[in-house]
Image (spheres, grey):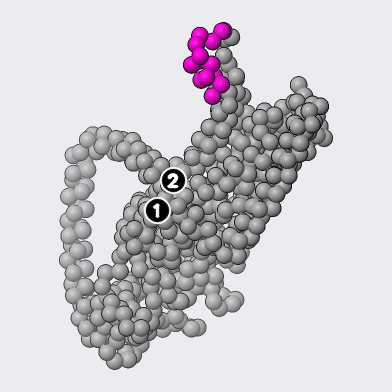
Amino acid sequence: MSRIAGSETEVVIGDLRRRYVPLTSTIFAMLLGLLPIVASSLWVPNLAFLILLTWRLVRPEIWQAQVALGFGLLADLIVPGAPLGQSMLLWTMIFLGLDYADYLFGARDYWLDWTLATAAILFHSAGVWYIALLMGAKVSIIIMIPQLVLSILAYPLMARIVLRLDRWRLSR
Amino acid sequence: MAPPSKRRPGFSRRAQYGVFIGYVIAIAGCLVAALLLAIAIIDPRGFQTLRSMAADVTAPISNAGRSIAGFFSGIGDTVGNYWNAAGQNAELRQQLEEAQRELNSRRALEYENRRLLALLGLAQQADDEVTSARITSSSFQSPRRLATLAAGSGSGVTPGMPVRNADGLIGRVLEGGRWASRVLLVTDGASNVPVRLVRDGTPALAVGRGDGTIELRTLEVGQNPFRRGDILVTSGAGGLFPPNIPVATVIGHEGERAIARPIADPARLDFAIVQRIYQPAAGEDGDLNTARPVAPAAPVPALPPQQGQPQTPSPGRQSNPRYQPALQQQAPAQNTAAAR
């Protein structure tokens, strides 16, 4: 696994990988929202949000809270269905909340990670529902439940994907 | 392992200020985002340029994905067709014969229809189709039910136009870019479509519930005239949606409310037709395309008698009269079909 870099190019490629894998994977997940799927009910988890949240929990040191603003703006523009500002507001608030949680708990283990992810997903779903309500879509909160449950159950899977990406990112 | 603290990144003043400024930016950004949201709520068209630009930029991705998905599902179909060729041939021949017979009777009806319209003094409206385009993607990760249509202002699509396919109503255009536009589906919580029951003409409002179904609200309190299997069509009341486009089928009741399912199945939306905005009394503003009665016509007596206040658009205010007689011939037929 570990070896001495053969050339300058390999060093540059390794550096790019180390810097941009989290960013690229999150944007890729965002673009998955443009897939030609027309679903009549809501159950697909918000993949961009899940990947972003998992990166934040797995690697707390790579991103500061303001990064969520940029990602949120991009998500609001790219993915249909959200008014401008929705993801910006919710994601940044979640990042700030997680910073506070880090301050409270210090070290985290897997179960605490999942609990924090659950809390973040609950907050996000409630926020999305309330903003839809304010935008005039008077839907019952019950329709959010399938997506909520699937998102919470998908967290371990996301953590594995992100950990594998992270290992590849830091490999030499 | 405890993560390295972001709150105190060491003794460097510079690094500490960096972290502090990061939090200031994040909190200020939250406030800006809340402001943007407030603007979006007060004036949903506020950022239309920006949003429609984003729709234009992202539309090719969905389009490409769409053709790839179509290609792969197409392979399966083609192979299946090859194996079932003989059986399918016989079946198609039979269907063709049936269709031919039906077509002949339709032609007779159409002729009669035209004759009656001429009798009433109504002119046929020019074709009200703006364009037809593919539905490419939808907001499947959000509680809103929006779809992306691969046509925009370049093909004459403007916000508010009704969108339908051959089966029934899909929704209306919410915002439009140059090459792509967003469609508010009838199942979205913010969509209200004035409908009426085909069986007896009872007016109602079809409000989306966000989960693929539609809630029906009657305008009269205390009675629920909807039965399982009833079909609802647009009534044309209030303009926007032209009358007599099929909207939904009643699937059951939840307590006091009647629940319906849209007839145009959103999951297999393919091509959609964008129509002109329907204006019930458009003939008065001098638009040559719209119909004008020569003489005030009496209400058509063919409608079955009904209690309450049936919403019968008088022929004098119909701008698109093609649909009207067809409905009146259909209504008793469907009644008997339901009875059987």
Badge 1 crowding class, 10 Å Cα cut-off, few under 14, some 14 to 19, many 20 or more, is many
Secondary structure of the residue carrying numbered label 1: loop
User: Which residue lies at the image location 50% right of the left edge and 43% below the top edge?
Assistant: A33
Point out the residue furthest to the front here: B14
Decide: few, some or many residues near mark 2? Use Cα within 10 Å; few <14, some 14-19, many ≥20: some
CA–CA distance in space, label 1 to label 2: 9 Å
Looking at the image, tell me whether mark 1 or mark 2 is earlier in sequence order.
2
Q: Which residue is label 2 attached to?
A: B58
Chain of the residue where label 1 is placed in the rendered structure: B
**Quadrant of image for the N terminus of chain B:** top right
The part of the chain drawn in magenta is: A3-16
User: B86 or B326: which is nearer to us?
Assistant: B326
In the image, is A106 to the left or to the right of B337?
A: right
Q: Which residue is mark 1?
A: B180
Where A19 sits versus B280, above or below? above
What type is the residue that disc 2 sits on? Thr
Residue drawn at 64 percent across, 36 percent down = A53
Q: Residue B284: which numbered mark, if any? A: none
